[in-house]
C-alpha cells in the first residue's frame, strides 16, 4: 500500500513550497498525495442554519474558483515533477480546514500531513499561520510536518528530538521520525534538557530512555544533555550549533511542551522558523 500524504493548500507560495518539500522528502517512496483546498462562500458561516448548496450561484462560483486554482497547481506540479512513484489526487470542498482534514484522515486513511506554516494572509508577526496552528492543535490522529518559507528543499541530515524521558514511548509514535531518518541517512539527536545541573535520571526516566533507544535501534542516533537552561533556549542553541535540518517532538498536551499555542518551544524558535517541525502525537 502506498504512503498516503495529505497536502492542504490555499494556493500560496508557502503552500507550494510545502508540497515540493513533501515530494522531495518522500522521493523514493510510493506515495498517494492528496491535495486539499477548502473554500467558503462570502457572507455565509459554515455553522449557520443556512449555507449555500450545490447548484446555487454562490456555491458554484466559489467551487469554480477553487477548482481553477487546483488546476493551475496541478499544471505547476506536473511541469516540475516526473517521479513515477508519486500519484496525485485533488479535493476541493466547502468546509473549514480542520473538519475537512478530519474527514479525509478517515476516508483516505491519511498517514501524515505536510503543510506550510504561513498562508496567503499570514503576518510576519505571527509564529505560524492560523491554519497550521489549528491543525497541529486539533488533529491527533496523524502527525503534521510544518514547513517554513525556505527557498528550497534541504534533505534532513541532523534531526533534533527533545525529550524529558518522563513518559514511555510507543513505536508507532516514533515510526514517522525513524522512516524519515532512514530515508535520508539522517542522525537523530535525542536531546534531554534538565533543570538541574547534574541531569540525573530517576528509575522511571532511565527505563523510558532505554525504551526509546530500543525503538531507535537501526538508526543513526545519539544522546545529548543540556542542564540548567530553559527548554526553548537550549533547543534553539542546539539547532544552531549542530546545524539541524528538522526538529521533531511528541505533542503531549499535558506534559513537557504543553499545547502548541502556549508552547514556549514554538514561540522561541522564532517568529520566522527556518527548519521544518515534525509534530508527532501520543495516540
Image: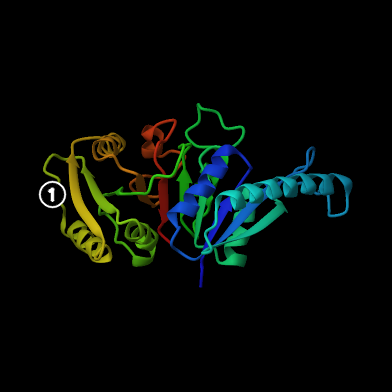
Q: Which of 222/52 is in front?
A: 222
Q: Residues within 10 Å of mark 1 (few under 14, many from 20)?
A: few
Q: Which of 69/191 is in front?
A: 69
The residue that mark 1 highlights is 200
Give the number of callouts: 1
Query: Relative to 148, does residue 173 appear above or below in the rendering?
Result: below
Q: Which of 94/79 is in front?
A: 79
Give the percent coordinates (x, y) of residue 39: 71, 46
Single out the residue that lies furthest toward the left: 198
Is residue 12 shown left or right of residue 17?
Answer: right
Residue 208 appears in which quarter of the rendering?
A: bottom left
Is residue 255 shown left or right of residue 32?
Answer: left
Query: Relative to 148, does residue 156 appear above or below in the rendering?
Result: below
Query: Relative to 128, does residue 180 appear above or below in the rendering?
Result: below
Give the percent coordinates (x, y) of residue 149: 48, 36
Is residue 216 shown left or right of residue 39?
Answer: left
> What residue sits 41% from the left and 45% below the top?
277
One can see residue 208 in this view: yes
Give the percent coordinates (x, y) of residue 84: 53, 63
Residue 242 appears in which quarter of the rendering?
A: top left
> What residue sits 68% from the left and 46% below the top?
72
Q: How is the image coloured?
A: rainbow
Q: Which of 201/42 is in front?
A: 42
Single out the residue that lies furthest toward the top: 125
Q: Locate the C terminus and report the quarter of the image it occupies.
A: bottom left
- Badge 1 marks a residue whose secondary structure is loop
Amino acid at each position: 500500500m502506498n504512503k498516503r500524504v495529505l497536502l492542504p493548500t490555499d494556493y500560496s507560495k508557502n503552500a507550494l513550497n510545502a508540497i515540493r518539500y513533501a515530494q522531495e522528502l518522500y522521493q523514493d517512496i510510493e506515495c498517494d498525495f492528496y491535495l486539499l483546498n477548502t473554500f467558503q462562500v462570502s457572507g455565509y458561516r459554515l455553522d449557520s442554519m443556512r449555507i449555500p448548496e450545490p447548484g446555487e450561484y454562490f456555491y458554484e462560483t466559489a467551487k469554480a474558483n477553487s477548482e481553477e486554482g487546483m488546476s493551475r497547481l496541478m499544471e505547476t506540479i506536473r511541469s516540475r515533477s516526473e517521479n513515477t512513484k508519486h500519484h496525485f489526487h485533488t479535493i476541493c470542498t466547502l468546509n473549514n480546514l480542520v473538519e475537512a482534514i478530519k474527514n479525509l484522515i478517515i476516508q483516505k486513511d491519511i498517514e501524515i500531513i505536510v503543510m506550510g506554516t504561513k498562508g496567503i494572509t499570514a503576518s510576519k508577526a505571527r509564529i505560524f499561520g492560523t491554519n497550521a496552528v489549528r491543525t497541529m492543535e486539533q488533529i491527533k490522529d496523524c502527525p503534521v510536518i510544518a514547513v517554513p518559507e525556505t527557498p528550497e528543499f534541504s534533505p534532513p541530515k541532523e534531526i533534533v528530538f527533545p525529550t524529558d524521558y518522563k513518559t514511555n514511548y510507543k513505536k508507532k509514535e516514533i515510526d514517522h521520525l525513524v522512516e524519515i531518518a532512514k530515508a535520508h541517512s539522517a542522525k537523530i539527536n535525542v536531546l534531554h534538557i534538565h533543570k538541574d545541573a547534574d541531569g540525573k535520571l530517576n528509575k522511571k526516566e532511565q527505563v523510558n530512555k532505554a525504551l526509546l533507544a530500543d525503538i531507535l535501534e537501526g538508526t543513526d542516533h545519539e544522546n545529548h544533555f543540556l542542564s540548567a537552561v530553559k527548554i526553548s533556549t537550549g533547543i534553539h542553541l542546539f539547532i544552531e550549533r549542530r546545524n539541524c535540518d528538522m526538529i521533531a517532538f511528541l505533542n503531549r498536551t499535558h506534559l513537557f511542551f504543553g499545547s502548541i499555542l502556549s508552547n514556549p518551544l514554538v514561540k522561541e524558535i522564532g517568529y520566522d522558523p527556518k527548519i521544518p517541525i515534525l509534530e508527532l502525537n501520543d495516540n
